[in-house]
């Protein structure tokens, strides 16, 4: 199966157009030849009309093109009428999307008032109970018939009113039916969405988009690749647009890195027609990251240099680290079963080495200039004379006229063709090539709708842009299973570049050197202040290396999305918290003012606590 037109030369996945609202009055068109659309979500109570209106106007002011509002009940859905009416009275015609979980009746109310309705196939017609049950083919067919009966009325009403739908699958909320047949897998996510899409097509309704969200960037990438390939298999008229996002990415640098890895790698392969960067921060900040991320794609995707390659050497639908031999980085080994290592330049080492404590987790593991390193040009076939052993560390030579993603993918293929398993050092930038690669690209880039990259006055990327470029380049390759060591050079600051390298490895699931947090963005369903509580939990737990903590505002995606977390802090009712171990609830209705202390106590009970140094 092929998931994109080419992994070597940028070509945007062709899709049909999906119309959201009236384009002549502020609506948007997703897909086709239109630029990638940016969207975000309100964080307030849907019954607070004035605040919803103001938050929407604030988002539109910074460039948000679609605004999503949760509608957890019929009452909330009915209030969308007042919100939309007030926005239109103020001359704001941004399309509004109702976010629906569990309540088909809320969707039927919301579709009267908004331009688009998002439904989650995992809970639109099912209530998740984590039940284990074997379904016969007949029983499964009966389940699909039940879903059709519940979903068809919304499809028919959306068709009648010229509304759009989003079939939005979440890794954390697959139905028990899907879980028991396909498991908690990318295949299960795709099949869950396709069940609902087939109902749309039965009614000749096509004004919808897909989404396949996960808090794990690698899972998210696999899901969208598999979905793209499956749609291509179904036929040319299954070319529906895709909405990209890493859900529950968190806040700050971690949230931006996870989003850049997941969204950026797919955009570079030509996949994606609309995006949301989900941060546990004020919503307008999400749009700023969208703008910066979209602006990088023209120089990171290979739009300028033809590459005559077809066969890849990795499975794009199932993550597996590329098999490699071990090599020396001085006192440390890389490749084989070793961790992916962090290499720094001599200049960076000289600045950070005097400040590093002996037991520090964040420290250089190799100096670039001191490595026994073979630098290769993958645009040329490799020969056995160049590589007569597998233990030689290799990389792409600086100056090669390809973006890093394309260059290192090609290097992996060349090694595979030669039958070599040499470990690979990844670089986030091939020095001297950034400007020349992008010089021939159009100002809007490959249909991103964004301008040129944001650089500081000395020509180096700003810290915000450096983070995104490095995360996309390195994260994309790591998600392909390529890479045994990494070198960050986009970030000019010595200490910042070292920490960025480790943060990228953690976000890509390659290493764990600090506490890992899964934190959802706020919305109207949230039962506590996510930003405040996340900061409070981090202040108590951010020294717990290797512990994963999920902070979820409500139950919608909670148990499933945090299934691989060690502990979960989940809003169960207003001002009441439920605590989880994995996906199992163990403590209920804890007063919010006591909940962080109870979480720390739970971590101690399970032997995961250490005192901060």
Image (cartoon, grey):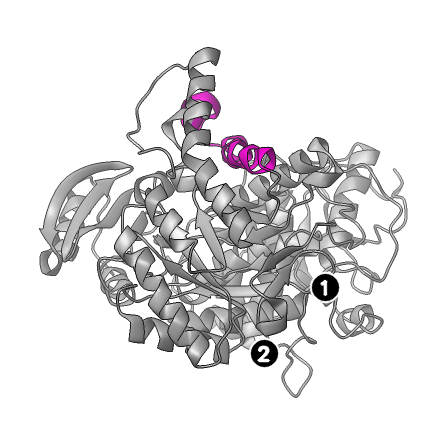
Residue positioned 50% across, 42% down in the render: 155
Foreground mark, 2 or 1, reads 1
Element on which disc 2 rests: loop
**Magenta part, dominant SS:** helix
> Label for residue 462?
2
Identify whether 88 is placed above or below 526: below
Toward the viewer: 254 or 563?
563
Element on which disc 1 rests: loop
Residue 404 spot, x, y in % from top left: 73, 58
Residue 95 spot, x, y in % from top left: 51, 65
Boundaries of the magenta span: 178-203
Q: If the image is split into quadrants, where does the C terminus sit?
A: bottom left
Residue 200 spot, x, y in % from top left: 56, 38
Identify whether 588 is placed above or below 10: above
Residue positioned 54% across, 33% down in the render: 199
Q: If the image is split into quadrants, where does the N terminus sit?
A: top right
> Label for residue 482?
none
Q: CA distance from mark 2 to mark 1?
A: 23 Å
Toward the viewer: 22 or 463?
22
Toward the viewer: 397 or 191?
191
Furthest-front residue in view? Answer: 160
Toward the viewer: 299 or 432?
299
Question: Is residue 579 visible in the rendered structure shown here?
Answer: yes
Q: Which residue is mark 1?
A: 447
433 vs 248, left or right, is right
Residue 191: in magenta span: yes
Identify whether 188 is placed above or below 595: above
């Amino acid at each position: 199966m092929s998931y994109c037109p080419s992994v070597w030369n940028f070509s945007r996945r062709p899709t049909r157009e999906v119309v959201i609202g009236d384009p002549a009055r502020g609506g948007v068109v997703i897909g086709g030849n239109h630029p990638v659309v940016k969207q975000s979500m309100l964080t307030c109570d849907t019954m607070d009309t004035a605040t919803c209106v103001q938050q929407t106007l604030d988002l539109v002011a910074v460039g948000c093109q679609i605004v999503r509002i949760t509608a957890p009940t019929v009452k909330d859905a009915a209030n969308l009428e007042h919100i939309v009416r007030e926005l239109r009275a103020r001359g704001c015609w941004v399309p509004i999307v109702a976010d629906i979980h569990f309540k088909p009746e809320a969707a039927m109310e919301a579709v009267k008032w908004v331009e688009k309705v998002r439904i989650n196939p995992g809970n639109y017609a099912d209530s998740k109970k984590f039940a284990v049950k074997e379904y016969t083919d007949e029983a499964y067919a009966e389940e699909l018939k039940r879903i059709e009966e519940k979903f068809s009325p919304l499809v028919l009403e959306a068709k009648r009113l010229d509304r759009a739908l989003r079939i939005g699958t979440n890794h954390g909320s697959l139905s028990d039916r899907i879980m028991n047949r396909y498991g908690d897998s990318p295949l299960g996510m795709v099949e869950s969405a396709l069940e609902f899409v087939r109902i749309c097509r039965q009614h000749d309704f096509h004004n919808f988009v897909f989404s396949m969200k996960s808090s794990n960037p690698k899972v998210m990438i696999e899901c969208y690749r598999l979905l793209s390939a499956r749609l291509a298999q179904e036929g040319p008229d299954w070319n529906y647009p895709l909405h990209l996002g890493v859900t529950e990415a968190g806040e700050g640098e971690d949230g931006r890195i996870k989003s850049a890895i997941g969204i950026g790698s797919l955009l570079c392969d030509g996949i994606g027609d609309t995006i949301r960067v989900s941060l546990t921060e004020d919503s307008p900040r999400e749009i700023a990251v969208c703008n910066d991320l979209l602006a990088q794609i023209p120089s990171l995707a290979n739009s300028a240099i033809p590459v005559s390659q077809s066969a890849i050497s990795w499975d794009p639908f199932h993550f597996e680290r590329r098999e490699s031999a071990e090599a020396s980085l001085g006192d440390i080994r890389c490749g084989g079963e070793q961790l992916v290592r962090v290499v720094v330049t001599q200049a960076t080492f000289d600045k950070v080495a005097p400040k590093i404590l002996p037991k520090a987790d964040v420290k250089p593991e190799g100096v670039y200039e001191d490595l026994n390193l073979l630098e290769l040009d993958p645009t040329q076939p490799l020969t056995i004379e160049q590589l007569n052993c597998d233990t030689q560390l290799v990389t792409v030579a600086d100056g090669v006229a390809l973006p890093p993603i394309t260059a290192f993918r090609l290097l992996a293929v060349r090694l595979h063709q030669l039958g070599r398993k040499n470990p690979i050092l990844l670089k986030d930038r091939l020095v001297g090539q950034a400007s020349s690669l992008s010089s021939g690209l159009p100002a809007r880039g490959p249909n991103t709708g964004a301008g040129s990259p944001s650089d500081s006055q000395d020509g180096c990327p700003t810290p915000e842009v450096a983070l995104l470029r490095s995360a996309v380049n390195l994260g994309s390759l790591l998600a392909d299973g390529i890479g045994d060591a990494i070198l960050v050079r986009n970030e000019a600051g010595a200490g910042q570049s070292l920490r960025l390298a480790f943060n990228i490895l953690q976000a890509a699931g390659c290493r764990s050197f600090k506490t890992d947090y899964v934190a959802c963005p706020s919305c109207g369903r949230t039962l506590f202040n996510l930003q405040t509580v996340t900061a409070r939990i981090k202040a108590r737990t951010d020294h717990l290396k290797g512990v994963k903590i999920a902070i979820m505002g409500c139950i919608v995606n909670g148990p499933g999305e945090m299934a691989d977390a060690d502990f979960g802090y989940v809003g169960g009712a207003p001002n009441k918290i439920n605590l989880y171990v994995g996906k199992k609830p163990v403590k209920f209705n804890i007063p919010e003012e006591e909940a962080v202390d109870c979480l720390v106590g739970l971590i101690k009970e399970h032997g995961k606590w250490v005192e901060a140094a």
